[in-house]
Amino acid sequence: MKTLKLMAILPMVPALLGAQQDAVVRLREVLPSEVAEQVLATVEDATASGLPGRAIAALALEGVAKGRSGEQVVAAARELRIALGAAHQALQQGTRTPAPGEIEAGAMAMRLGVEGPTVSALASTAPSGRSLVVPLVVMASLADRGLPSDQALGAVHARLEAWATDADLLALPGEVGELLAAGLSPSEVGRTLAAERIGFSVPVAGLIQWAGPPAGVPVNGGTSIPRPTPPVPPPPPVRLPTP
């Protein structure tokens, strides 16, 4: 899956960002001049709009390395430009000024089926100062595995509320994979993850287990509890006739 490939290279992001510094120069070296000019025009348009244009250049270089035609490279560059713009808008609507990496992660998430309002909801509810790169990547991975957009958001948001580290978040797709392998549907997995907050846990074996009621609260075995019978009022006093 594309998301899993991205997650595999996530630790390499700093090095990749450094390598992208030469992406624009290399485009002129590896692409026919007409194709290079079209791609570079898209890169410049994105940069002028406050978007990470070098991500478009890097995508174009990847396409060249994979033997894509010039027409395919240009089309992919323009598609990514649109996705970056949509992600930037969604993050801003979540009252966040997004960093370049967050815009790229948001674009990837939306291209894998995460809806714009869901990206906005994550941006508006995430802890202040917390980078959204990993949460967005994880949410995209969950959507790529078939989870509905809102359930993917709920699973990520629950961990953010619990102050989960990036490593904790990156473990979430693996938990989902185990539940899917155990035979649950994506919707059932989403509901199970949501239920973690009300008593369910997802063990390593991938089976749903009931974590039980809170301490001190007895388990109801299903036997109905009779309602208490209201007290019967005493009879009114008997008055004797006066002689």
Image: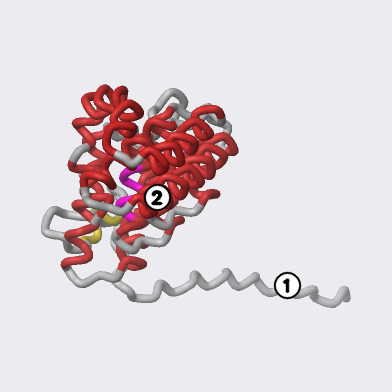
User: Quadrant of residue 158 in the image?
Assistant: top left
Mark 1: which amino acid? Pro
Please give the residue where the numbered disc 1 appears in the rendered image.
236
Residue, far right:
243
Would residue 144 be seen by someone viewing this image from the given angle? Answer: yes
- Coordinates of residue 105 in the picture (x, y in percent): 38, 40
Report the magenta stretch's main SS.
helix
How many discs mark residues in the rendered view?
Answer: 2
User: Which disc, if any, is residue 76?
Assistant: 2
Q: Is residue 128 left or right of residue 59?
A: right
Q: Tell me which residue sits at (17%, 66%) in the image.
A: 181
Q: Are marks 2 and 1 in contact (CB under 8 Å)?
A: no
Tell me which segment is drawn in magenta.
Answer: 137-142
Q: Which of the pair 84/182 is nearer the observer?
A: 84
| First of labels 2, 1 by sequence position | 2
Residue 139 inside the magenta-drawn segment: yes
Label 1, secondary structure: give it.
loop
Q: Is residue 193 left or right of residue 168?
A: right
Q: Which of the pair 82/137 is nearer the observer?
A: 82
Q: Quadrant of the N terminus?
A: bottom left
User: Which disc, if any, is residue 184?
Assistant: none
Q: Tell me which residue sits at (40%, 27%) in the image.
A: 130
